[in-house]
Amino acid sequence: MGFAMIWRATILTLFPDMFPGPLGVSLAGKALASGLWALEARDIRDSATDRHRSVDDTPAGGGPGMVLRADVLAAAIDAADAGQSRPRFLMSPRGRPLTQSRVMELAAGPGPLIVCGRFEGIDERVIAARGLEEVSIGDYVLSGGEVAAMVLVDACVRLLPGVMGRQASRTEESFSEGLLEYPQYTRPQEFEGRTIPEILVSGDHAKVAAWRQAEAEALTKARRPDLWAIKTSQKSPQKRPKSTTDG
Ligand code: SAM
């Protein structure tokens, strides 16, 4: 009542002290301090019920390591999210890889609840019981979900209104048009014998734009044939109507 809803990330972790960590500095940190977004790191262990405050147990069927218990995690999720409807994620190497388009969707919503796994992972039943969407930040295995959660939150926060200086910097960057970004240069004009490409200092904006487009296409083709295949399969590039959020 009277409050504008701000974008809020709730993190469920065994290591709440890891937050805000890198999210507390630079653009994201300044925006956090000025109330443009909110971060809540909750300790899963607070939802343990036995006197040892245990959160994990040995895997059913045997094998190495420990698994986070479904009952403890479900209680932690329920305590964090009572009655709210917002996206709920489990950071997981098994998940669908995070993309910029998913990040843009999330930044436009109320902000996620994110479960950070540890050990061998979490009991499968809580994933279904609490509707957790598994998200991966890449094909490698981290020791816990916290760093992955920071990646997800950082990518969203920089898109929130008022966090980044110029809107243009987010519409021209890598992935926004299905291409990697063109090369950037700044002063000095000559560095160790290498000069800034002539066109960029010509003052001809149309030529600069054409050069950048060609560079972005060449880079994408060479480095990310997977992205290039998607780009070239879209026969007529869709012109987006200018939306009110486009600045
Ligand atoms: N045994 C699991 C497997 O092989 O899929 C790996 C568990 S990993 C050691 C511990 C936790 O780190 C996971 O539960 C997950 O939360 C997080 N994690 C590891 N790699 C990740 C990735 N690529 N993306 C997102 N989260 C990851």
Image (tube, grey):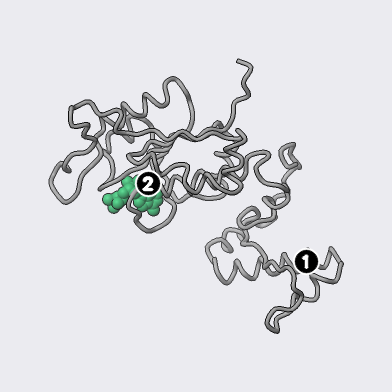
* Residue 93 seen anywhere in this rendered image of the structure: no
Does ligand 1 reach within 8 Å of label 2's beta carbon?
yes
Residue shown at the point (33%, 36%) measured from the top left: 127
Q: In which quarter of the image is residue 82?
A: top left
- Position in image of residue 158 (x %, y %): 60, 45
Relative height, residue 120 to residue 84 (above, below): below
Q: How crowded is mark 2: few (under 14 residues within 10 Å), some or many (20 or more)?
A: many
Question: Residue lying furthest top in this view?
Answer: 1
Task: Tell me which residue sits at (74%, 75%) in the image.
Answer: 196
Left or right of residue 242: residue 80 = left
Question: x, y percentage for residue 148?
Answer: 43, 49
Alpha-carbon span between mark 1 and mark 2? 41 Å
Q: Nearer the viewer, residue 189 or 120?
A: 189
Report the side of 172 relative to 50 (left or right).
right
- Where residue 198 appears, x then y in whole percent? 80, 76
Q: Earlier in the sequence, mark 1 or mark 2?
A: 2
Figure check: 109 above or below 173: above
| Residue ID for mark 1 | 210
The residue depicted at 58 percent of the width and 42 percent of the height is 157
